[in-house]
Image (cartoon, rainbow, N blue to C red):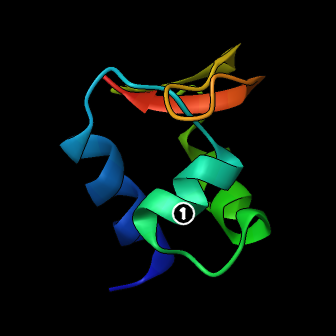
């Protein structure tokens, strides 16, 4: 499974939860946060995904996060 599929699968399994790139990397089992960021960028503005600066559901840090709604 490629990184894009891993990210989408992880987000779909955790609906309405926001994840920063670092936590998304860990949860979706992607090699590093930079690769997670590359997969999140195309999801910006695409429904059913939401991207914005909010508190991460996993680490609680205020960062740019993505969620599947």
Query: Residue 47, image x and y in percent?
Result: 38, 26
Quarter holding residue 31: bottom right
**Residue at (62, 33) in percent of width and height:** 59
Quarter holding residue 20: top right
**Residue at (39, 25) in percent of width and height:** 17
Q: Is residue 27 above or below residue 63?
A: below
Is residue 46 visible to the viewer in this orientation of the structure? Answer: no
**Residue at (44, 29) in percent of width and height:** 67
| Of the pair 59 and 13, the residue shown nearer to us | 59
Is 3 left or right of 15, judged from the image as shown? Answer: right
Q: Is residue 51 above or below residue 30?
A: above
Q: Secondary structure at mark 1?
A: helix
Query: Residue 65, image x and y in percent?
Result: 63, 30
In the picture of the structure, the residue carrying the numbered disc 1 is: 26
Q: Residue furthest top?
A: 54
Is residue 21 visible to the viewer in this orientation of the structure? Answer: yes
Query: Residue 57, image x and y in percent?
Result: 49, 25
**Residue at (72, 55) in percent of width and height:** 37
């Amino acid at each position: 499974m490629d990184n894009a599929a891993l990210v989408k699968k992880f987000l779909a399994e955790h609906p309405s939860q926001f994840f920063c790139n670092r936590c998304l990397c860990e949860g979706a089992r992607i090699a590093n946060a930079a690769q997670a960021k590359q997969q999140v960028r195309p999801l910006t503005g695409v429904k059913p995904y939401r991207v914005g600066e909010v508190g991460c559901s996993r680490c609680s840090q205020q960062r740019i996060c993505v969620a599947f709604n």
